[in-house]
Amino acid sequence: MMYLYNTLTRKIEKFVPLNPPKVTLYTCGPTVYDYPHIGNIRSFTNNDFLKRTLIYFGYQVTHVMNITDVGHLTGDNDSGEDKLEKGARSTGKTVWDVARYYTDYFFSVLKKMNILPADFFPKATEHIKEIIDLIKKLEDKGYVYQTPEALYFDVSRFKTYGQLSSQKISEKISGAREEVYIDPHKKNPADFALWFKKVGRFKNHQMHWPSPWGDGFPGWHIECSVMSMKYLGSTIDIHAGGIDHIPIHHENEIAQSEAASGQKFVRFWFHNQFLLVDNQKMSKSLGNYYTLDDLQKKGIEPMALRLLFLQSHYRQIMNFTWQSVKAAQEAYNNLKNFVLTLKKQKERTSLSQEKMAKINNFLSQFEEALGNDLQTPKALAVMWSMIKSNIPSTDKLDLLFTFDRVFGLRLNEITEEEIPETVINLAKEREKARKTADFKKADRLREKINQLGYRVEDSNQGYIIKKNN
């Protein structure tokens, strides 16, 4: 049984999919104009924890993650310029080259972070026909009006606009800063663009397609409705994304989707909180804007970052520090050593009723933590408690691999490096010296091992030989 916090209702609800055991899941993908930073990666990883948990509990998940390669302006409220155009100008490449490069890079990040691939990765540029068809449908229903610059969705026509953010249209309109709205012909500041015409500020836009309203390109919001409904149907079980998308992007998705279909668009909204760096918002100007490459250059493995993300609940603001990520790397090193030690202890011992009860209890605690709105910190605590327990090594390894179906830390892929026989013999000799309390000899042997390019790491379960970095 699984319970999830639903942003739409603002409470934790029992999750029951529309057509169990099938689950339809749509997660916000990247706008491919720049490298994803660790805040983006946290959101993608939390969505992966959700997906893995659903699969763990026996659901059959159909997952769509969009690739936004056109139409996302620098201001989510239709102000500014297209982010792809901005990225192309800064690199001297075409927008098509920029989109291709950052899309490929994004997929490499997913692979490094061990994020399960979606069933579909639709691109906005490959769904222009479907986007035009949906806009036509909305136009026929009276939700669309034109200006010389664009086609807009009239939010005043959609009576429940604001249901996700709990903000009334009047509040959105009166609270808006008029100076940020570029198009002076918009009826209401909250109205949002469905299609931008290739005129005025967009006359030099590199990506454009013919439409009944003239050459142009789609707005950001309409793309997600089209791609989610095409692959998952008019009503989807879970839509995931960042908390910053609630007041504009996701509110607009609901309006245009439900106006077109007449059906509920999303049953559960799953939103990730922000990631701060040293208690500040990430910014290139502050010098605290980090990518996965930045972390790897400092010796932080992607799985250590994943372990760090597990330590914070997805609905909590997380503060990233170099101290915390280095501690996560150390914890991951210890975990790898533990797995290697357990793999050497292959004999199964008979289980007492007490130890069998402990195993079942650890499993129960793990599932309870995940089933209660994806409490990954509690699930992680169960793992560390299990490691310290007195249950047999083989059962510990089995449980670790079971937990890792959700954690995704690649524990089953951990193997010991091929160590030269000379180093192995020195390590054995050193271990004998330690057991006879001949610590001077043990230290000399450790130094010899180090000179050969290896090191010995001791633990309560024995020792591990590792190659020096």
Image (spheres, helix red, strand yellow):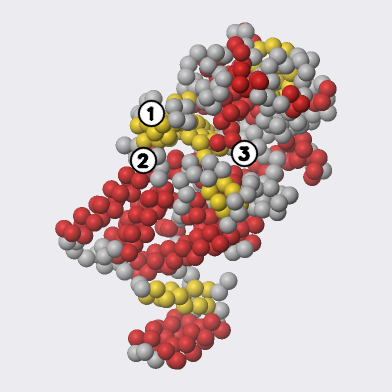
User: Could you tell me which residue is drawn at 67 percent across and 53 percent down?
Assistant: 288
Reply above or below: 274 against 341: above
Q: CA distance from mark 1 to mark 3?
A: 26 Å
Q: Is residue 6 left or right of residue 76?
A: left
For label 1, the SS is loop
Residue 149: x and y in percent read: 77, 18
Q: Is residue 134 left or right of residue 327?
A: right
- Quadrant assignment for the N terminus: top left
For label 3, the SS is loop
Residue type at mark 1? Pro
Residue 24 seen anywhere in this rendered image of the structure: no
Reply above or below: 233 against 111: above
Q: Residue 30: which numbered mark, if any?
A: 3
Residue type at mark 2? Asn
Q: Answer with the quarter of the image where residue 29 lies.
A: top right
Packing grade of label 3 (10 A; few <14, some 14-19, many >=20) is many
Q: Earlier in the sequence, mark 3 or mark 2?
A: 3
Q: Are marks 1 and 3 in contact (CB under 8 Å)?
A: no
Q: Earlier in the sequence, mark 1 or mark 2?
A: 1
Q: CA distance from mark 1 to mark 2?
A: 16 Å
Q: Residue 372: which numbered mark, if any?
A: 2
